[in-house]
């Protein structure tokens, strides 16, 4: 087997390197999120999977860099980093904004001749399902209130006023990127898609998640979990189990 592509030191994080793994999972964070959000996934799967978490600019060790306020530009940059990572089958997992970033990166890689095995699109409506969301236009306090309401940001960050003010520009860039993103219904990938959604998610209805089927020329599966936008916090064991089954081929993701 070829060696796993090395961390580029900027965009990619391997918390538990698995150079002998025969498959790879690339994880894309939500708006305001960081690579460390996927540390538990890496810990759980690293015995058999090369787990790579993407680190966007403007957070943690990249907090001095400006954020990227365009999904298209962000996807261009990540696709360039992942170009040539063809040494083993690669699956994408993205939550919320990360689902759209994963979709757009996969589309770019496919256009250049690479293949993604499957996209797990979590907590996000289909790319062509639009809402008029304006969080990125709120003042800092308004954005912080949104972060608290979604309960997906580390409480230690929310409690550290100095750190919070430092990373707010990048978080605003994230919200600008995802809230100004739009894709036509005919924008597709060849990779199959598994859409995951919480049944009480204020950001994505089950119907909006089901429309991911419009954006793949392969099959699309839907799974509904109990919970809200960050259902992952309470259902992490179940989600990791489904990912493990995907990689071992013991079971297909079921439709709910």
Image: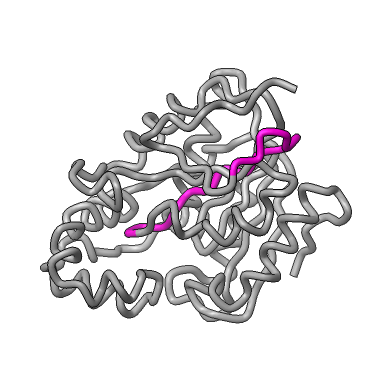
Image position of 2 with respect to 175: above or below: above
The vertical placement of 238 against 213, above or below, is below
Side of 230 where 22 appears, left or right: right
Say whether residue 16 is visible.
yes
Q: What residue is drawn where x is 72% and y is 49%?
A: 47
217 falls in the magenta region:
no
For the N terminus, the quadrant is top right
Image point (53%, 81%), residue name: 200
Q: 187 or 8: nearer the eye?
A: 8
Q: As drawn, is 174 to the left or to the right of 218? A: left
Asked where in the image residue 197 lies, by quadrant, the reply is bottom right
Question: Who's the residue at 70% across and 29% down the image?
Answer: 88
Magenta stretch bounds: 17-32
- With respect to residue 159, does 243 lie above or below? above
Query: x%, y% of residue 121?
Result: 57, 54
Q: Residue furthest right?
A: 250
Predominant SS of the magenta segment = loop
- Residue in front for this viewpoint, 216 or 201: 201
Identify the residue shown where x is 14% and y is 64%. 165
The percent position of residue 6, horizontal first and vertical second, equals 52, 28
Picture colour scheme: one colour
Quadrant of residue 192 in the image? top right
Residue toward you, 116 or 86: 86
Numbered marks: total: 0
**In x, y percent, where is residue 167?**
20, 57
- Can residue 217 be seen at all in this image of the molecule? no
Residue 3 falls in image quadrant: top right
Magenta segment: does it hold 22?
yes
Question: Where the C terminus falls, by quadrant?
Answer: bottom right
């Amino acid at each position: 087997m070829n060696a796993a592509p090395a961390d580029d030191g900027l965009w990619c994080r391997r918390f538990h390197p698995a150079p002998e793994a025969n498959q790879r999972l690339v994880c894309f964070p939500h708006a305001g999120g960081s690579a460390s959000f996927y540390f538990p996934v890496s810990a759980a799967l690293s015995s058999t999977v090369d787990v790579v978490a993407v680190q966007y600019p403007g957070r943690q060790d990249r907090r001095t860099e400006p954020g990227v306020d365009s999904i298209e530009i962000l996807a261009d940059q990540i696709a360039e980093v992942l170009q040539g990572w063809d040494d083993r089958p690669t699956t994408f997992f993205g939550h919320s904004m990360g689902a759209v970033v994963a979709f757009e990166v996969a589309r770019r890689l496919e256009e250049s001749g690479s293949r993604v095995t499957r996209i797990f699109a979590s907590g996000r409506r289909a790319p062509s399902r639009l809402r008029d969301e304006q969080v990125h236009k709120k003042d800092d306090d308004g954005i912080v209130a949104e972060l608290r309401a979604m309960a997906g940001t580390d409480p230690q960050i929310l409690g550290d006023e100095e750190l919070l003010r430092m990373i707010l520009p990048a978080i605003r860039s994230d919200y600008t990127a995802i809230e100004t993103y739009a894709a036509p219904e005919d924008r597709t990938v060849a990779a199959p898609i598994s859409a995951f959604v919480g049944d009480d998610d204020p950001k994505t209805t089950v119907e909006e998640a089901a429309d991911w089927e419009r954006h793949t020329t392969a099959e699309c599966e839907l799974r509904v979990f109990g919970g809200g936008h960050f259902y992952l916090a309470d259902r992490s064991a179940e989600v990791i189990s489904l990912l493990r089954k995907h990689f071992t081929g013991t079971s297909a993701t079921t439709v709910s």
